[in-house]
Image (cartoon, rainbow, N blue to C red):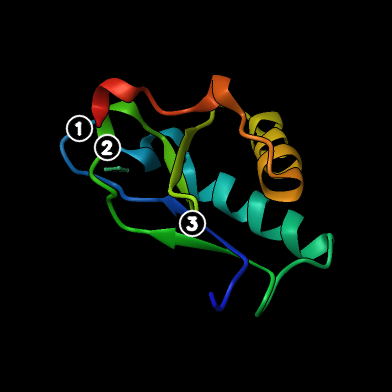
Amino acid sequence: MSFYEKHLFFCTNQKENGKKCCQGANALEFWEYAKHKIQDLGLAGAGKIRVSKSGCLGRCALGPCLVIYPEGVWYTYHSFSDIDEIIEKHVLSGEPVKHLFLEKASL
Ligand code: FES
């Protein structure tokens, strides 16, 4: 059994020399927004949901990116409303948000 029902990892990596990276799209702000939203919903903690920062997840060109386990579903996002949609549909209802999937070409 998993310690968390769902675990979201937001890449917040910052690269040097202007290379494309998730923090270049303000990933930390989105991570913080998602974390507070889950806390405000009373869903944070053991047996529930965890929202973590991560280092580079290796898919920089398509980012900013996040991955949700145990499903292993990868998303990108561009706004706080994208984060709301991922949380409300995928996390709370188990409904994938296909238009925010990371491109399959990167697999
Ligand atoms: S910088 Fe985010 S995946 Fe590499």
Q: Which residue is mark 3?
A: 69
Residue 80 image point, x, y percent: 67, 34
Q: Secondary structure at mark 1?
A: loop
What's the distance in space between the residues labelled 2 and 3, CA to CA? 16 Å
Q: Which mark is residue 59?
A: 2
Residue 35 image point, x, y percent: 65, 59
Give the answer, above or below, for where 46 lies relative to 19.
below
Mark 2 beta carbon near ligand 1 (under 8 Å): yes
Q: Amino acid under label 1?
A: Lys
Q: Quadrant of residue 100?
A: top right
Residue 18 image point, x, y percent: 21, 32
Q: Which residue is mark 1?
A: 19
Q: Which mark is residue 48?
A: none
What's the distance in space between the residues labelled 1 and 3, CA to CA? 27 Å
Callout 2 environment at 10 Å: few (<14), some (14 to 19), or many (20+)?
some
Callout 1 environment at 10 Å: few (<14), some (14 to 19), or many (20+)?
few
Between disc 2 and disc 3, the foreground one is 3
Mark nearer the N terminus (2 vs 3): 2
Residue at left offset 45%, top offset 60%: 53
Between disc 1 and disc 3, the foreground one is 3
Image quarter hosting the C terminus: top left
Q: Secondary structure at mark 3?
A: strand
Residue at left offset 56%, top offset 51%: 31
